[in-house]
Image (cartoon, rainbow, N blue to C red):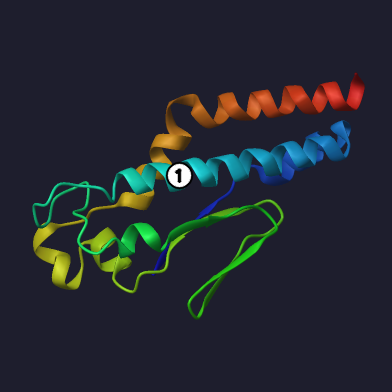
Amino acid sequence: MISLNITVNGMDEIVIGLKAFGAEGYKALQKGLAWAAEETDKEAHKLLTGPKTPGSYPVTVKTGNLRRLLDFVPPGQTKTSGDLTWTAGPLQAKVYNSAQYSRVIHEGEGSSKKYGKRPFLTDALDKVMGGGLFAQHMSGELDEALKESFG
């Protein structure tokens, strides 16, 4: 099992600033975090759809468990996978893989040591958060919050 928390640096300052928007600013931040989690999930799925070559990256599909057990939790929600429960705080989102061997593949440990790290979650998150995608999406969410709050 492996999971990533998606939060924003300087969250306390952002929340204080969003109070001027009222409830709409807080909702905008939650929507942005939910979007980041969903997009990270989509990108990670792509990195779990590799060729039939053992040890390849994107990761080879054998049974489909890594893709099937990959999911995300939007802010303020909880999901259960098997005997595991994943909870995201009100200003946090999570992306997780509940396959028992997901960490082994992600970190290149144990039976995957000979192949090295295949960091499907962190690479997916880097793609979503890097390059301005998240900032661009949040800008749109905040524009909508402004319209809702101030007309």
Where, quadrant-wise, is the C terminus in this rendering?
A: top right
| Residue depicted at x 76% and y 25% | 144
From the top left corner, tell me how far across and down residue 78 is, in percent. Answer: 64, 65
Q: Number of numbered discs present? A: 1
Does 84 sit above or below residue 72?
Answer: below
Q: Label 1: state its secondary structure.
A: helix
Q: Which residue is mark 1?
A: 40
Furthest residue to the bottom?
83
| Residue depicted at x 45% and y 36% | 128
Q: Does residue 29 appear left or right of residue 86 in this picture? A: right
Q: Does residue 112 appear left or right of residue 41 in this picture? A: left
From the top left corner, tell me how far across and down residue 29 is, in percent. Answer: 70, 39
From the top left corner, tell me how far across and down residue 115 is, in percent. Answer: 11, 58
From the top left corner, tell me how far across and down residue 7 is, in percent. Answer: 58, 48
- The answer to whether residue 104 is seen in the rendering is yes
Among the 4 quarters of the image, the one containing residue 26: top right
- The answer to whether residue 8 is seen in the rendering is no
Amino acid beneath label 1 = Thr
Given residues 94 and 60, the one toward you in this image is 60
Does 109 sit above or below residue 27?
Answer: below
Does 138 sit above or below residue 118?
Answer: above
Given residues 7 and 137, the one toward you in this image is 137
